[in-house]
Image: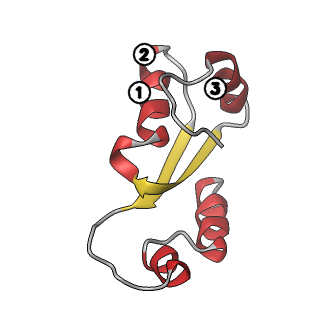
Amino acid sequence: SVACPLEPDLDALKEACKSKFILTVEDHVVDTGMGAIMALALARNNLSAKIKNLGVTRYGDSCASGKAREAMGLSAENIAKEFFNLAE
């Protein structure tokens, strides 16, 4: 959990690359969050891992938070499914 990333911990990112898979889950816009920062850090540091970023993909849903997470693909079930898909 990272509250306000300015830059990722490069040593932690290198360690994560050893698994060959990185999955980020964000409760805000997916294209501007930690996943995007990590993808950029991978490229800038010539690191390699299969990466999947999950998060908010659109605005406008007005419902209970659980339903909103499910609508954005952020339910526990979908996160697990995406992780296993990433590892295939």
In which quadrant of the rendered view does residue 29 lie? Answer: bottom left
- Describe the element under mark 1 as helix, strand or loop: helix
- Mark 2 lies on residue: 44
Q: Amino acid at mark 3?
A: Leu
Q: How is the image coloured?
A: secondary structure
- Mark 3 lies on residue: 13
Q: Residue furthest top?
A: 45
* Residue 58: x %, y % from top left: 28, 66
- The quarter of the rendered structure image containing the N terminus is top right
- Please give the name of the residue rendered at 66% of the width and 21% of the height, measured from the top-left corner: 14
In this rendering, is residue 62 above or below 53? below
Report the front residue among 74 and 84.
74
Is there CB contact under 8 Å for labels 1 and 2?
yes
- Mark 1 lies on residue: 40
- Please give the name of the residue rendered at 65% of the width and 30% of the height, measured from the top-left corner: 17
Q: Amino acid at mark 2?
A: Arg
In which quadrant of the rendered view does residue 82 lie? Answer: bottom right
Report the front residue among 20 and 6.
6
* Residue 16: x %, y % from top left: 69, 32
* Residue 72: x %, y % from top left: 43, 72
Q: In this rendering, would 87 be left or right of 46?
A: right
- Describe the element under mark 2 as helix, strand or loop: helix
Q: Residues within 10 Å of mark 2 (few under 14, many from 20)?
A: few
- Please give the name of the residue rendered at 27% of the width and 68% of the height, measured from the top-left corner: 59
* Residue 80: x %, y % from top left: 67, 67
Q: Earlier in the sequence, mark 1 or mark 3?
A: 3
In this rendering, is residue 22 above or below 40? below
Q: Earlier in the sequence, mark 2 or mark 3?
A: 3
- Describe the element under mark 3 as helix, strand or loop: helix
- Report, in whole angstroms, how far the alpha carbon at label 1 lies from the one at label 2: 6 Å
- Report, in whole angstroms, how far the alpha carbon at label 1 lies from the one at label 3: 11 Å
